[in-house]
Amino acid sequence: MKSGAVAIIGRPNVGKSTLLNALLKEKIAIVSDKPQTTRTRILGVVHHPEAQIILLDTPGLHKPQHRLNKRMVRTALETMREADLIYVLVEATSPPGAADCLVIEQVREAVEAGGIQAFLLINKVDLVNKARVLPLIEAYRTMLDWREVVPISAQTGLNVDRLLDLTVKVLPEGEALYGEDVVTDQTMRALAADLVREKILHHTRQEVPYSVAVEIERFVEEGKLARIAASVLVEKESQKAIVIGKHGERLKAIGTEARIEMERLFGMKVFLELWVKVREAWREDEQMLTELGY
Ligand SMILES: Nc1nc2c(ncn2[C@@H]2O[C@H](COP(=O)(O)OP(=O)(O)OP(=O)(O)O)[C@@H](O)[C@H]2O)c(=O)[nH]1
Ligand SMILES: [Mg+2]
């Protein structure tokens, strides 16, 4: 059988986590329309009849401004170098930009350093006319020695199964590293924290999404019930007021949406308590970042 690791790489917001979920046919990575949603490496295992494919979703590559972002970019670069294959995601909706070229430069270094192959995946083709995809392929074609170039839609699933088949072909022979029932290495605590953050991203705008972290304070399983208490960290009082909302309505909606999704994912009833706390400049605090799992 075949077995290997595939790193999913690209600038923020191109659809890497959406693709991970589509390939797994299960949602384990959070998704939002705000850049820098993913902050850690997210592992997912695809059990293909001929292969075990270990997918590694990564934070979007960007020019980091804070210590948090430096860690995110480092995580993506390290993950890329450990992989057998790199999926480089770009968007069909715009021509190659500076951010995409920077990504491809970094991938080139990993490919040339040793034994790693790369697929170019042109994502979000559901948003554009077919006629616009061909010139894009041509524009990207010469930038790297791509093993495959595949237009996809992570959202609609277009070409996603074909991508898996092409992937199996290039992976090395090897043993399965994970048991048949393993989908991810994420702990329930980490999944719970990210689900709360995802709902906050959906309900807030501008600088708030970047300034939020979620810390699980308590996670107790009592039979078919999980009691979870989480702190939502923000950087300013004004952000705390936004997350809580008028009469606490926004925080209530965030909690309800996160709880419903946790119940589905964990297959148990969830009792979720959320507290919002101000932690000034937590994004620069190395100890805090480590505690948060970043
Ligand atoms: N129309 C369309 N939208 C997509 C597609 N794939 C992803 N999206 C949307 O693009 C946005 C970003 O998706 P993510 O999967 O969070 O992107 P990402 O690359 O993981 O982003 P970061 O984690 O911030 O680096 C979300 O609003 C998705 O719903 C696609 O194939 N078609
Ligand atoms: Mg992501």
Image (cartoon, helix red, strand yellow):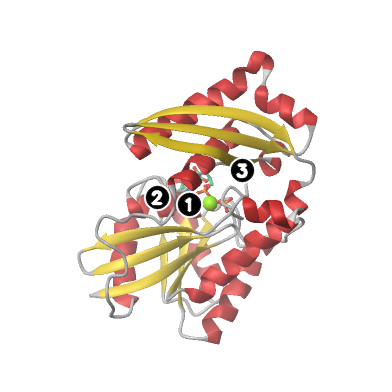
Pointer 2: what residue?
21
Q: Residues within 10 Å of mark 2 (few under 14, many from 20)?
A: some
Confirm if mark 3 falls within 8 A of ligand 1.
yes
Amino acid identity at mark 2: Asn
Mark seen at residue 34? 3
Confirm if mark 1 falls within 8 A of ligand 2.
yes
Question: Residue 8 location in percent, x, y?
Answer: 48, 63
Location of the N terminus by quadrant is bottom left
For the residues bearing labels 1 and 2, Cβ distance under 8 angstroms: yes
Residue shown at 75% from the left, 53% from the top: 285
* Occupied quadrant, residue 70: bottom right
Q: Earlier in the sequence, mark 1 or mark 3?
A: 1
For the residues bearing labels 2 and 3, Cβ distance under 8 angstroms: no
Confirm if mark 2 falls within 8 A of ligand 1.
yes
Pointer 1: what residue?
17
Say which element carries label 2. helix
Location of the C terminus by quadrant is bottom right
